[in-house]
Image (cartoon, rainbow, N blue to C red):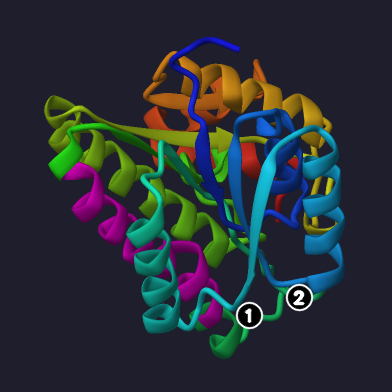
Amino acid sequence: MHPTDPRTILITGATGAIGSALARTYAAPGNLLILHGRNPAELENIRTSCADLGATVITHQGDLTEIDASRAWLETIYEEHHLDLIVLNAGMNIHIGPNGEAESWSDTRQLITLNLLSVMALAEVSIRHMRPHGKGQIALISSLAGYFGLPVTPSYSASKAGLKAYGEALRGWLGPMGIQVNVIMPGYVSSPMCAAMPGPKPFEMSPDAAAHRIRRGLSCNQARISFPFPLNLGTWFLAVLPAGISGWIVQQMGYH
């Protein structure tokens, strides 16, 4: 382990595919992991596996859409620990119906609250506590869907595009103060959430491979950690091509 690697790490959504794999990559003697999740059985499983690897583990079960309670929880964490790294990973996905039915408004509101507003709320708490120390790292889990909205997942795409813009803005503001902000943009990572998503899933990768790619990018403070290649290059082109051409390409790929 490099001496500058984070030793105190908080991960939200640690019971999900990427979150649990990322927790295991940071589980090592001398490291403190603070893991959030909504599924108590899965949270206990990941706690045990990380503890077996030598890490000290604190867990928290909670619904991050209850934003005031989530912010109060994070404040109590900062009262006892200085976080080297906070990975704001918790999220959900919804999609249009099999016959083109619209996403329900209640689902959309819950998704935006969890994927975007809760992340911004917890990031604000972290920024206030990290600025006096002039150090710390905040990682936001966006998606390659943040480059160009997919017709099958409009709300999810919007939330991830918002995180991308928010994280890039934070990085420009906080970087000169010593606080690192990184936007993580994975492609398709094997998980129940990924399996439930309609449409093709090119270059799908395992959670462990994604976690190692994320950790490598965070360790060198990569501004935008996007993968896998060449899917990341292709989605970047969708963002810069004329919208009519990009929309046609997406339709030809089967996202309709």
Of 96 and 138, nearer the camera is 138
**Residue wearing tag 2:** 97
Q: Position of residue 182 (x, y in %)?
A: 39, 33
Q: Is residue 255 left or right of residue 245?
A: right
Range of residues picked out in magenta: 110-131
Tell me the quadrant of the picture where the N terminus can be found. top right
Q: Are marks 1 and 2 in contact (CB under 8 Å)?
A: yes
Number of marks: 2
In the depicted structure, whether residue 222 falls above or below residue 27:
above
Asked whether the viewer can see residue 203, the reply is no
Q: Amino acid at mark 1?
A: Ala
Majority secondary structure of magenta residues: helix
Q: Which comes before the other along the chain, label 1 or label 2?
A: 2
What is the secondary structure assignment of the residue under circle 1? Answer: loop
**Residue wearing tag 1:** 102
Q: Is residue 151 left or right of residue 208?
A: left
Q: Is residue 7 left or right of residue 210?
A: left
Q: Is residue 11 left or right of residue 190?
A: left
What is the secondary structure assignment of the residue under circle 2? Answer: loop
Asked whether the viewer can see residue 5, the reply is yes
Task: Look at 14% across and 37% down and name the residue there.
Answer: 173
Q: Position of residue 216 (x, y in %)?
A: 57, 17
Q: Position of residue 120 (x, y in %)?
A: 34, 61
- Residue 171, by quadrant, is top left
Q: Amino acid at mark 2?
A: Gly
Task: Look at 24% across and 44% down and name the residue there.
Answer: 130
